[in-house]
Amino acid sequence: MRLDVVTIFPEYLDPLNVSLVGKARAHGRLDVHVHDLRAWTHDRHNTVDDTPYGGGPGMVMKTEPWGEALDTVLADGYEDGAHGPVLVVPTPSGRPFTQELAAELSTHPWLLFTPARYEGIDRRVTEEYARRLPVYEVSIGDYVLAGGEAAVLVITEAVARLLPGVLGNAESHRDDSFAPGAMANLLEGPVYTKPPRWRGHGIPEVLLSGHHGKIARWRRDEALRRTTAHRPDLIERCAPAAFDKKDREM
Ligand code: 6GU
């Protein structure tokens, strides 16, 4: 998968060299290109923003640098043989980023991110590229960030770990909170490793029983308990058939 990020803070994307995403790059599974938007300005101050039409606080990112930047990045990518780019526009007014959307994005060979600062990018930029490319306007949650760069890191990490060969063990995503399947819509319960006693804390007996059926049931109970406490909205979304008599007695 190819990733391009156009930003006024290229160094904000340095974490893409680290950990799982960094390793995916090193192994050639991810081809990451970070570009400085100011490279496509032509004035002495490398201006990327201006005051909003209609008035109001803050500044709006200008059309021209984004247009030149995106044209150049697209041309370069096509020249490299990439095809099927999609534009991912991080914005608090986008559609919610979910595991499902991460899975959908992970099927595209090329993602182009346009994280904005200030009050966002002049609407005409999205309009223009929506004529040529699928555009996903995406929000990572109900809070406001100072810019979209952190959202690019979040989205990239969620997408990269779904790419074939990146996680190593395909089973690792099977029980993920939000993964499809029997535990769909349940948060993952607690996990433990050695030693068996630490500062007076033991581990649940059942995990030492070797009884796979009992262990699976315990994990499901714990997932249900945690989901009820932290995300009752997810329980509401489960089909009633997902619960048995024992669940209802919990
Ligand atoms: Cl994608 N960008 C910004 N600036 N704030 C956000 C966001 C994105 N998602 C949630 N809040």
Image (tube, helix red, strand yellow):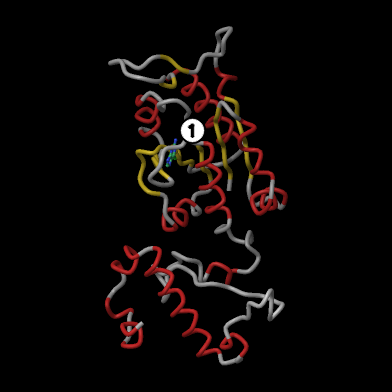
Q: Nearer the viewer, residue 24 or 206?
A: 206
Element type at marker 1? loop
Q: Position of residue 112 (x, y in %)?
A: 51, 38
The residue located at (33%, 69%) in the rendering is 235
Q: Nearer the viewer, residue 67 or 12?
A: 12
User: Seen from this angle, which residue lies furthest front?
Assistant: 200
The residue located at (46%, 85%) in the rendering is 217
User: Seen from this angle, which residue lies furthest top?
Assistant: 44
Q: Position of residue 157 (x, y in %)?
A: 57, 51
Q: Is residue 239 left or right of residue 185?
A: left
Q: Position of residue 138 (x, y in %)?
A: 41, 43
View quadrant of ligand 1: top left
Q: Amino acid at mark 1?
A: Gly
Name the residue that disc number 1 marks.
147
| Count of residue discs | 1
Reply above or below: 236 against 130. Answer: below
Q: Position of residue 28 (x, y in %)?
A: 69, 50
The residue located at (62%, 88%) in the rendering is 208
Which quarter shows the C terminus?
bottom left
Reply above or below: 182 against 92. Answer: below
The quadrant in which residue 78 appears is: top right
Q: Is mark 1 within 8 Å of ligand 1?
A: yes
Number of other residues with Cα within 10 Å of mark 1, as a class: few under 14, some 14 to 19, many 20 or more: some
Q: Nearer the viewer, residue 89 or 30?
A: 89
The residue located at (48%, 32%) in the rendering is 146
Reply above or below: 27 against 6. Answer: below
